[in-house]
Image (cartoon, rainbow, N blue to C red):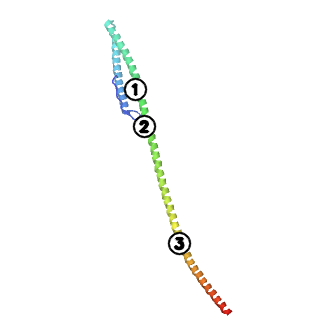
Amino acid sequence: MSASYNFRTAFNGFNREDVVHYIEYINSKHTGQLNQLRSDLSAAQQENATLKAKPQHDPELEAKVAQLEEALLAAQNAKAELEAQLVDMTAQRDAALNDQAQVQRRNEEELEAYRRAERMERQAKERTELMYQKANGVLADATTKVDNASAQINGIADQVAAQLAVLQQAVTGSKTALKDAAASLYTIRLTGEE
């Protein structure tokens, strides 16, 4: 386990696939070592049982049994250490997966916020366009009404101008008639005084 392992960096941490592959590699390696230790333990236990079954007291055999018992103890200690490492690596994997899930959740929340903002912007544009169309409709109606009122006012102004012209002619005619009448009266008066 002295070999170093390089993780590629990713957004907010390590690349998830590298971490998962590394953890799978470590799990596989630990499982292999555990299986080997179990196999060694089983072989040692069988050999120990075989040796215990023999009633002979062979010093060489007893030394071998002691050696095997030491190997068994070492294997059991190594197994316990590997199991502790496996628990540690599993915790690290779970933490990495949890971190990755949190990053993904944050990314999804940001994406949803962006989509909401985009929807609101689109709705605001649609409302603005609708208000613009309504305002144009109101302006078009007002322009039509102003044009109609202007045409009516022009017609009335033309009628008033024509009536004023007639009235001016009447006033001019009246003035002329009055002047003529005054002149006639003056002539009659002068004739009456003679």
Q: Amino acid at mark 2?
A: Gln
* Image position of 162 (left or right of 69): right
Provide the residue designation for mark 1. Answer: 89
Image quadrant occupied by the C terminus: bottom right
* Residue 70, quarter of the rendered image: top left
Query: Gap in Å between the C-alphas at discs 2 and 3?
Result: 73 Å
Q: Nearer the viewer, mark 2 or mark 3?
A: 3
Q: Is residue 3 above or below residue 107?
A: above
Q: Amino acid at mark 3?
A: Asn
Of all residues shown, which one is farthest toward the right?
A: 193
Image quadrant occupied by the N terminus: top left
Query: Gap in Å between the C-alphas at discs 1 and 3?
Result: 95 Å
Q: Secondary structure at mark 2?
A: helix
Provide the residue designation for mark 3. Answer: 154
Q: Nearer the viewer, mark 1 or mark 3?
A: 3
Q: Earlier in the sequence, mark 1 or mark 3?
A: 1
